[in-house]
Image (spheres, rainbow, N blue to C red):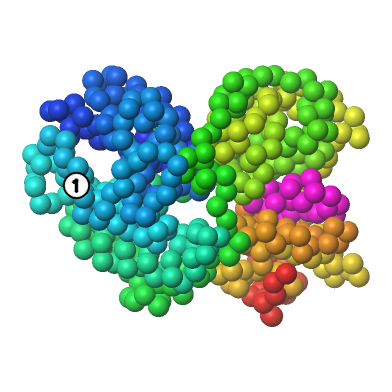
Amino acid sequence: MFLRQVTNQVLALCSYFIADEKTRSAVVVDPQSDIDVYLELANEHHFEIRYVFLTHTPSEFVAGHEKLARRLNATIVLGPGAEALFDFMPAADGDEFELGDLRIAVVSTPGHTEDAICLLIYDLNASKDRPVAVMTGDTLYRADCGRPDLLAVEGHTYDHMSALLYDSIQTRLSHLPGGTLVYPGHAYGSIEAGVIVDSTIDDESESNFAIQSPNRGDFVEIMAAYSHAGASTGPPFYMNRGSELPDYARRTKLKALSFEQVLEWQREGALVIDFRSVQRFAGAHLAGSINLPSFANLTCLNYMAHVRAVVVCDPGEEEKAVETLTAAGFDMVVGFLRGGMAAHGLSTRHVGRLRRFSGTEVLRQLMSSNAPLLVDLRSSTDWKLDGFATSVNMPFAEFFDRASALRKDDPIVLYCQSEFFSGIAGSILKSQGYRRVATLLGGMTGWRHLKSKLGPRADIVGPPITPTAV
């Protein structure tokens, strides 16, 4: 059996190329938008890709299943109850696909989505009864599990999806042989170049709360701390059901724009996305642009994905930036700022800045007559543990559905764990006309370092006396 994991560090994706070396037949599981890597593997090792499996319908990136199937006349396989506009083979629980000495068995695991499946991989040369690996998609990650609330927008209740996810993990995955390799669909925060992302069922039994949860009720309560009440299915979800990603972005991905051309696109409604770090963006950026440092996950911008976009990044990063936007569903990237920000001496009227307040400055302002509103972008669990006592909690995943409750003329200080997400949120508020927005310098990590030096003055920090939400 031939098995190759294909990772995308930008979007924290894991996909898989699996083949039988006797029949030279292959399958691809959860392909990313750039299908060249799978075509190259097939060509290099003389395999024929016959099936393309989706373990669920992704909502945060555009998958490559349609492109692969069309290019190779391969069959797309989806889980029970899946809906799509393209031709596909619906797979039921227990269905098996045998390609020589390779067997793939479908396991229905609803919870993350209703059509979610996992795939048991058997090397029949080794054993006909014990799987070598399980492809878990977004059902089970390393020491974590998928969100159970992505389909709230389609009428599914959070508790119902959480209960389904618990049952799937407990009854379909936790009892697999302990040595079974676990290959997830994502590896948030842990993908490194050249490093295989995997674990075993035994590993997960020892470290994964989703397997260790003693009962369904406790699991649902634990997952409530990670609930994304405002989550929605963005453009990639519907593209993955059959509304294909246009080739527009790829045709224009290397189009260099002058500063005047970028301004013209911006005046016509284009979204300017700046991929530089929070620190550099805050110091000076094109007024009205949005910051996505280090090629952050773009799910937060799904609601903007069908607008024209212009990229601002460092020279040499243009192609990576455009490919990232394309994979996240931005289908109208018109080009990038030639030479990046450093190549242009901007006049004051075109320069925007995002203020960054130190912890001591935040304390000083909180004791003034015009104290700012503190917004904690972390999970409700973290907020209750050590958030500022006077803060309100808007978890980042919910922020863009709830931000309209904030008043544009009020002073606002955003904070998260490290300033990463607060920088993104602050840039979007600034682009929407919020004038008095700042971030907490260094986030809560920086604050904790400062807190030890402040003594009683730091008592203004949580847990919140009366949990408040806007």
* Left or right: 401 in relation to 120: right
- Position of the C terminus, as image quadrant, is bottom right
As drawn, 63 above or below 387 = above
> Please, what secondary structure does the residue beneath circle 1 have?
strand
Residue 162 sits inside the magenta stretch: no
Crowd around label 1: few <14 · some 14–19 · many ≥20 (10 Å): some
Q: What type is the residue that disc 1 sits on? A: Glu
Q: Percent x, y for residue 47? A: 24, 24
The range drawn in magenta is 420-440
Residue 16: quarter of image: top left
Residue 27: quadrant of the picture: top left
Residue 370 showing in the rendered view: yes
Q: From the image, tell me which residue sits under label 1.
A: 96
Identify the residue at horizontal 23%, vertical 20% (top origin).
46
Whether residue 442 appears in this view of the structure is no
Vertical placement of 23 versus 406: above or below?
A: above
Q: Seen from this angle, which residue lies furthest bottom?
A: 466
Question: Which residue is found at the position 65% from the left and 29% from the top?
Answer: 333
Q: Position of residue 286 (x, y in %)?
A: 80, 35
Where residue 236 appears, as percent x and y from the top left, is: 53, 43
Quadrant where the N terminus is found in the figure:
top left
Q: Residue at x 90, y 29 (%)?
A: 347
On the picture, is 237 further left or further right than 308?
left
Left or right: 130 in relation to 377 = left
Give the image location of residue 138, x and y in percent.
40, 52
Is residue 99 rendered to the left or right of residue 292?
Answer: left
Residue 438 belongs to magenta span: yes
Determine whether 358 is above or below 229 in the image. above
